[in-house]
Image (spheres, coloured by chain):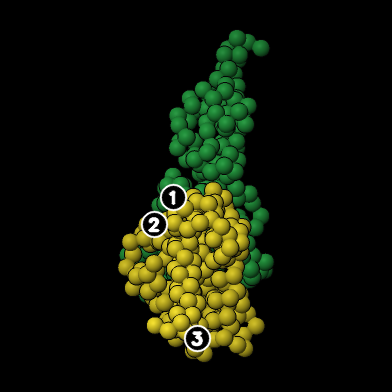
Chain colours: A yellow, B green
Amino acid sequence: MTTGHEVDSVPRRFTDRSADSRAAILAAARARFAADGSEKTTIRAVAADAGIDASMVMRYYGNKANLFHASASVELALIDHVTADPAQLAAGLAHAFFERWETQDNSVERLVLRTAMTHPEAIAQLQRLFDEQIKPSILAALSEDPDAELRAALIMSQTIGIVLCRYLLGLEPIASADPEVLERALRDAVLQHLTRPL
Amino acid sequence: MTTGHEVDSVPRRFTDRSADSRAAILAAARARFAADGSEKTTIRAVAADAGIDASMVMRYYGNKANLFHASASVELALIDHVTADPAQLAAGLAHAFFERWETQDNSVERLVLRTAMTHPEAIAQLQRLFDEQIKPSILAALSEDPDAELRAALIMSQTIGIVLCRYLLGLEPIASADPEVLERALRDAVLQHLTRPL
């Protein structure tokens, strides 16, 4: 190995280690915030769980609010479903919703919703999720509609209601209903919110 | 006053005092459960807040779970809106919902929903609310429909979603939307859940 090669590889190895550390910190933070709530969670406890020095956690995230923000970020990728045809958009959003909730890890969404009842920073996170991910996908699809933002909010309300009843609280009969039946119900509810006169 | 009259009035006065004590206990319990959550609330603290001896609270309610159940009971009176005409039922339910949430005291509903995320007894209370008040009103209206129960659950999911977004979390733009616009949106969503093929 030449000296040049070694010098070249140092920043890359450092970056990999840094990414690993951040991932470990965020995983530990999610688990702590979910188990203890935001108030009782400390940077020190998260650092200990992640096996990383607390000063490093502070260096990466600065404070607990930033750490919550970083650990509770979700990428819904709804923009992939944008189409000018409301029926297709509704079907795409409903399908993406149930695919995500029935088959994927939702610990971040669960964390944000569970803590939202008592912690303003989780409410801010939900508002950001609406503003930055849900609303733009509806606005892009309904570009001419002055009520697009309220339509998006109504769609969010129906969706959050299903999340709450089925996935977070397990209320019957929605908790054990056939997901395909629910997907069609959500699709039609979304389509109605997209198209009915407001 | 005759002796007969006095004897007659003793039980009535006792009952009045008992009703006052119970009302004071339940009001104190609601405030404590809402502020501290179910876990941190104690019978002793509730009794102190109500100005009533803790042994009396125990005599009336037995334990904390019963006290929560009693203090978190809601009377939605949805059965008043039952009609065989789905459009009329949807309009009645949507109107009753916004009348309740826009103009009345909702501390009990807020308490149950806020604590449901972390306390199984609040989830049980929500399930009871659905089973004993929401479902029967929909079943009575749609007596021939084998899917009436799931329709009721979907209506509950849309309704809880609006409660959460507008009243508990204050997410925009639904939090500051015109309640009449929202009432029409809820009416149409309820009607769709009542009538679409499942």
Question: Mark 1 = which residue?
Answer: B123
Q: Chain of mark 3?
A: A
Identify the residue at image location x=33%, y=61%.
A176
Residue A170 is tagged as 2
Question: Mark 3 = which residue?
Answer: A82
**Other residues around mark 3 within 10 Å, as few (<14) / some (14–19) / many (≥20):** many
Number of marks drawn: 3
Give the distance between the C-alpha atoms of the residues marked 2 and 1, in whole angstroms. 8 Å
Residue A73 x, y percent position in the rendering: 52, 68
- Label 1 amino acid? Ile
Examine the image and state in which quarter residue A150 appears. bottom right
Q: Chain of mark 2?
A: A
Examine the image and state in which quarter residue B15 appears. top right
Residue B181 visible in the current orientation: yes
> Viewer-proximal residue, A163 or B2?
A163
- Label 2 amino acid? Gly
Q: Are marks 2 and 1 in contact (CB under 8 Å)?
A: yes
The answer to whether dots 2 and 3 both sit on one chain is yes
Residue B84 x, y percent position in the rendering: 44, 64
> Viewer-proximal residue, B98 or B108?
B108
Give the distance between the C-alpha atoms of the residues marked 2 and 3, in whole angstroms. 31 Å
